[in-house]
Amino acid sequence: MAFERSMLLFFLLAHLFLTTKVAGQAYTGNITQNGPTLSPSGPYSYLTSPSGEFAFGFRSLESNTSHFLLAIWFNKTSTTQPITWFAKNSSDTALAPLKSKLNLTQTGDLILVGPSSETIWSTRLFNATHLALLEQGNLILYDRTESAVWQSFDSPTDTLVPGQSLSEGSALESKLTDSDFSPGRFKLEANQNGYLALSLVVQPSDLEKLWSSETTSGTSLVFDSSGLLSYQLANSSSLLNISQSPTRRYYQHATLDPDGVFRVYVYDKNLSDKGAWSVVKELPDNACSKTVDVGSGMCGFNAYCTESSNSNLPRLNCSCPQGYSFFDTNRPYLGCRPDFALQNCSAEEATNFGIVEMQNTDWWGAGDYIHFVTNDEGDCKTSCLSDCFCYVAIYRDTDCWKKKLPLSNGRQVTTQGGKALIKVRISGGTSLIQPSAPVPGSTTKKNRTDLVVAGAVMFGASLLIIIASMTIAYIYLLRSKRGHESKQVDLNQMGMNMKIFSYKELHDGTRGFAEELGRGAFGIVYKGALKLGDHLVPVAVKKLERLLKDGDREFTNEVQSIGQIHHKNLVKLFGFFNEGEYKMLVYKYMSNGPLTNVIFGTAKLEWNRRARIAVGVARGLCYLHEGCSSQIIHCDIKPANILLDDNLVPRISDFGLAKLMGVDQTRATTSNIRGTKGYFAPEWFKNTGITPKMDVYSFGVMLMEIVCGKRNIDHVAEEEIILTYWAYDCFTDGRVDLLVQGDEEAEADIDRVEIFLRVAIWCIQENPTMRPTMHKVVLMLEGEVPVAPPPDPSSYT
């Protein structure tokens, strides 16, 4: 096993090396007409700036291992080394085979030629005598008078660096994907009409505007040497001041990413080999919500966009709805196609279709052909099922919109509200999906009748067949459990398929429950690895113990609550084991453990990552409260129950205390719910009905801990320090800086620190009605709505 791990590490390092830059000797001087020549095959493959912070030369390609990219990149960053410029021709990227050469000719042209001396790219100059790579990352060609005759800053590709501008009439063009440098789908242009515009490339010469600065007096997008990125106006003022980080401490670049978002990235030079690039600003905000009047939108026809991200390198993700799949999994932006035969317009055909629900999802303004108002969601479903033109209905409040294919501008965001009712085939042809729940007025009754008639014809006694089938199924289930064979069960009422694991699988997969990850009120969590499909997947197995007399009900609630939800900030449940008194849940393993590991102590995460984690947790809670078909209240929000995945994306875990809240929600009271000291809402002790505002209070306490990096209850010199009291005193005294003293990144972003603190204080108001909803918390943290100064949390009596 040690040998296998060593070999795996070797290949991973080899892959990382090959995808960063080509092995070869660096040249540190200027290149003249007399040489040297740069080539992927050496002896010199790249040129460095005087300090070595930037490099210019050949980079290998992950998507095309036989060719190389002529590029400029950050040379001293220890993780990824972002490319800031690359050679492009008028219609495509210039790629060089292994034995290509770049040299400055005697006629004064910088030219890249292939192995057969064919021209791949050139600057088309006739008077350059030498070139140099400057400290700012600007490649400049000079003539004999030392005048610049060409520079890379004047020919931007997808990136700007400090000191560079996007002048009027020029544009940044995205790559196709992170690893494919072919021309992409998005363009950011300093328009000659005076505004900054982000557009989707519909055809090579046609654009559909997604966002603009809405001004007609602009001249250029300037990334000045101090780190301020702004859109300069004709009257010498500026618009969109979207970044300000000192360049002395940070490397910076602003890139139009393949997903169509213009992002500002920073890298702390002081962290040396421990550094990582982080996003400090995105333009536009809420990119998933941007639409085009004609065309597919951000993700292609029938697909939808989600703002799924990790803590420092976010990306918009394109996904297919259930029952659909990508035309090309390597190019998801091409959109999705249905996996089933489409509906014809016969009356009988309508019974072959059912509905799958997707919360907070819409294909905005696309394919709408009927709109009506109804107080009954079932009317919206039934209307779409009976209409052969309808493939999606959107139900929001009392409105029902019916849509036909293809669908455009798909998006799934927590602020969307409502749900998409997606029609899929369930019988009578190719069928790859079952409906998530029986649909009123659909096929359930007819199918049962058909089965009874068919049974009577074939066997003469449908009742005996049903009894026999149930008996056989029961015996088979018992035998499969006793034989420790896992079964796949269709848990329609839970909204998903989960695996029922055998005890032997979990015992063997955890090496006899050998490695303990943690303990809680309901039991112990063990690390393991289980085969799911064709892959061995790391898992966390939660072995439930010391259940109350209604432990079966608690267990069922947890399975249902987790099994039916899908969100980037919620832990994923793979399956469960339930036999007699033994109950276990199998989760996706979160490699970075609980949030407590990274917000307390001297090794806490930097401020920008902590802020992203706070927003992610808020989004997850908002989904639990407002996005699920049945409201879910967690009842034990605290850092120990927030787990971090490989990319430090926060995921809310441990729904053992959660209750599915329906019409009888007032029957569930705090008297039979267990929480954690320090995170209780005041009403927790009053035996009142459980409400989402209890989670809001707990989140507010945790938000203060994330901001300050200190525990809510701490003991210093035998004195108990309550963080919420101290934080409010600092706020009223105008000394918010004391809460983040010594945290340079937070101190430099003190305005956002204060906004987060204001939100936290609103969340911990003793009066539950004064606390915001989690939906509003998300909007406040994301800067979508202003945050008023909060009152004293204890002023309510």
Image (spheres, grey):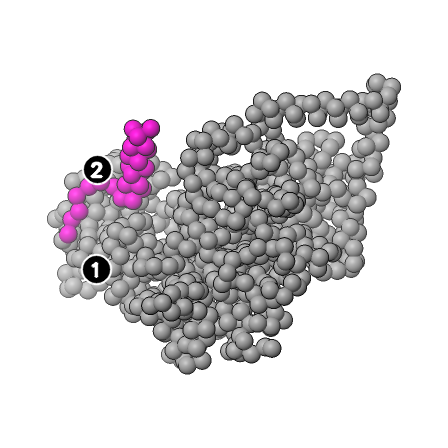
Q: Is residue 700 left or right of residue 548?
A: left
The image position of residue 594, as x and y in percent, is 43, 51
Mark 1 burial class by Cα count in 10 Å: few <14, some 14-19, many 20+: some
Residue at coordinates 73% horizontally, 32% vertically from top-left?
Answer: 427
Q: Quadrant of residue 452?
A: top right
Q: Is 107 rendered above or below residue 270?
A: above
User: Badge 2, how many Cα within 10 Å: few under 14, some, many 20+?
Assistant: some
Determine the secondary structure under disc 1: loop
Identify the residue under disc 2.
41
For mark 1, what is the residue?
134
- Answer above or below: position of 312 versus 244: above
Secondary structure character of the magenta stretch overall: helix
Does any portion of residue 515 appear in the rendered image? yes
Image: magenta residue range: 1-28
- Viewer-proximal residue, 226 or 479? 479
Q: Report the amino acid beneath label 1.
A: Leu
Q: Nearer the viewer, residue 341 or 85?
A: 341
Spot the residue most to the front.
718
Q: Nearer the viewer, residue 564 or 49?
A: 564
* Relative image position of residue 671 (x, y in whole percent): 63, 58
